[in-house]
Amino acid sequence: MINPYIQYMYSYPHKTAYRPMSGVSLWDYKDKLKGPGHGLYLHIPFCQGKCGYCNLFSVTGANREAMERYLEAVWRQAEQYAGVLKSQGTSFSSVTIGGGTPLCLQETQLDQVFSRIESRFTLESGRDVVIETAPNQTDRGKLKILKDAGVTRVSMGIQSFSEKELRTLGRQHDAGPQPGSGEKGSGSFAVLWICLRKPGLYLRNPGTGYGVSDPIP
């Protein structure tokens, strides 16, 4: 069995993959997409800020309208792909939503992403559903949407619990407050505290990833 973390890391498109392309048609690859067991990737490029170390394709400063235009373009392309994939009986055993920071989307947009993926593609039961986020974009409302959508793993870009290191990296969140302080916030410790004190949320990889398997009120 392929280690899911290695598979996920190496299937992540580099920023150079996002460029104008000509003479490329999904029809040319349709025979490789027959049957079950395939992986579906959806790129949400929006971020609050650009981290200096990031070599992935991301966009900062986008407003709600710009995000809506991007999503509508994605759904038009999905309609075209769905026609090709249906003819091959293609089904997906994994769905990965990366970025960017997908949870930069509004709650209604995020909910729509999951519903439209389900309506356009054939997803297998027991599928792995992975999404990326950052501490300052994660709250109870969005976590509930992820749970309801059957997300099996959340990859959270905490990067560090050191304020100095976070500033050096150009992260948009802080490290505090500390668990048990009674303070509220969207820093690394605060979001960890929200996640880990909820039944069914468990740490998969210290500081970087979580699994969601049970109700989030």
Image (spheres, rainbow, N blue to C red):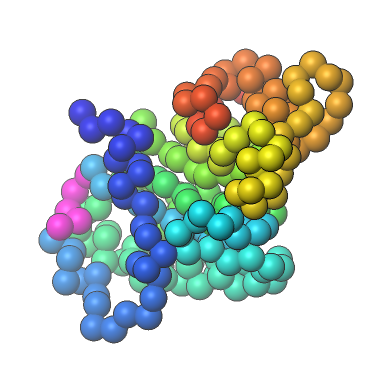
Residue 119 percent across, percent down from the top left: 45, 54
Give the residue furthest to the right: 182
Which quadrant of the view contains residue 190?
A: top right
Q: Give the range drawn in magenta.
A: 32-36
Say above or below: 105 vs 68: above
Residue drawn at x 60%, y 73% is 69
Where the C terminus falls, by quadrant?
Answer: top right
Residue drawn at x 17%, y 54% is 34
Instruction: Please indicate, yes or no, whether residue 138 appears anywhere in the rendered image.
Output: no
Residue drawn at x 36%, y 58% is 13
Residue 141 percent across, percent down from the top left: 72, 38
Does residue 162 appear to the left or right of 181 in the view shown? Answer: left
Does residue 47 appear to the left or right of 123 in the view shown? Answer: right
Give the residue furthest to the left: 31
Look at the image and say whether residue 35 sits in the magenta stretch: yes
Residue drawn at x 29%, y 40% is 7
Please state which of residues 84 and 168 is positioned toward the viewer in this rendering: 168
Residue 74 percent across, percent down from the top left: 48, 67
Q: Magenta region, mostly helix, strand or loop?
A: loop
Where the N terminus falls, by quadrant?
Answer: top left
Instruction: Please indicate, yes or no, whether residue 133 appears anywhere in the rendered image.
Output: yes
Does residue 34 appear to the left or right of 66 in the view shown? Answer: left
Look at the image and say whether residue 95 sits in the magenta stretch: no
